[in-house]
Image (tube, grey):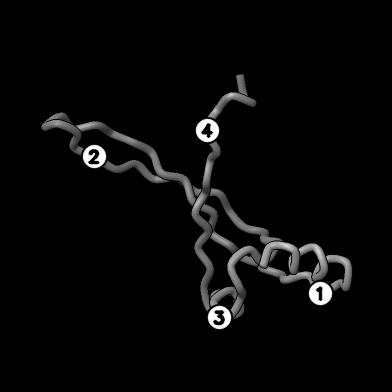
Amino acid sequence: SLHDALPIYIPCILWGKNAQEAADALPGAKLRVTGRLQSRDYVKVVDGVSQTRTAYELSVTQAEFPDAPDFLEETAAFF
């Protein structure tokens, strides 16, 4: 079932100003993003056997660190 599945992590790629702002963020800070989900195939060799796998990533076009007081209080709980 979906609830028994392992967590899924999707790497996010940020460029330019979005990347600069994210670089200054503390771990655990909340971030709202908009972007394009992309996939690419790659070959991984496991025990001498080639396996074709698919990697997914989010190419971020907009990133926002919400600054509402209640949002900041929620985020501060992570530190």
Q: Secondary structure at mark 2?
A: strand
Please give the name of the residue rendered at 61% of the width and 75% of the height, measured from the top-left corner: 25
- Sequence-wise, the earlier of marks 3 and 1 is 3
Q: Secondary structure at mark 1?
A: loop
Kindly report which numbered mark, 1 or 2, lies closer to the viewer in this rendering: 1
Q: Amino acid at mark 4?
A: Leu
* Label 4 neighbour load within 10 Å: few <14, some 14-19, many 20+: few
Q: Amino acid at mark 1?
A: Asp
**Residue 44, labelled with which disc?**
2
- Sequence-wise, the earlier of marks 3 and 4 is 4
* Label 2 neighbour load within 10 Å: few <14, some 14-19, many 20+: few
| Residue 22 percent location from the top left of the image | 59, 74
| Residue 5 percent location from the top left of the image | 55, 27
Q: Amino acid at mark 3?
A: Gln
Q: CA distance from mark 2 to mark 4?
A: 21 Å
- Sequence-wise, the earlier of marks 1 and 4 is 4
Q: Quadrant of residue 23?
A: bottom right
**Disc 1 + disc 4, Cβ < 8 Å:** no
Q: Which residue is mark 3?
A: 20
Q: Quadrant of the N terminus?
A: top right
Q: CA distance from mark 3 to mark 4?
A: 31 Å
Q: Amino acid at mark 2?
A: Lys
Kindly report which numbered mark, 2 or 4, lies closer to the viewer in this rendering: 4
Q: Which residue is mark 4?
A: 6
Q: Which residue is mark 1?
A: 67
Q: Secondary structure at mark 3?
A: helix
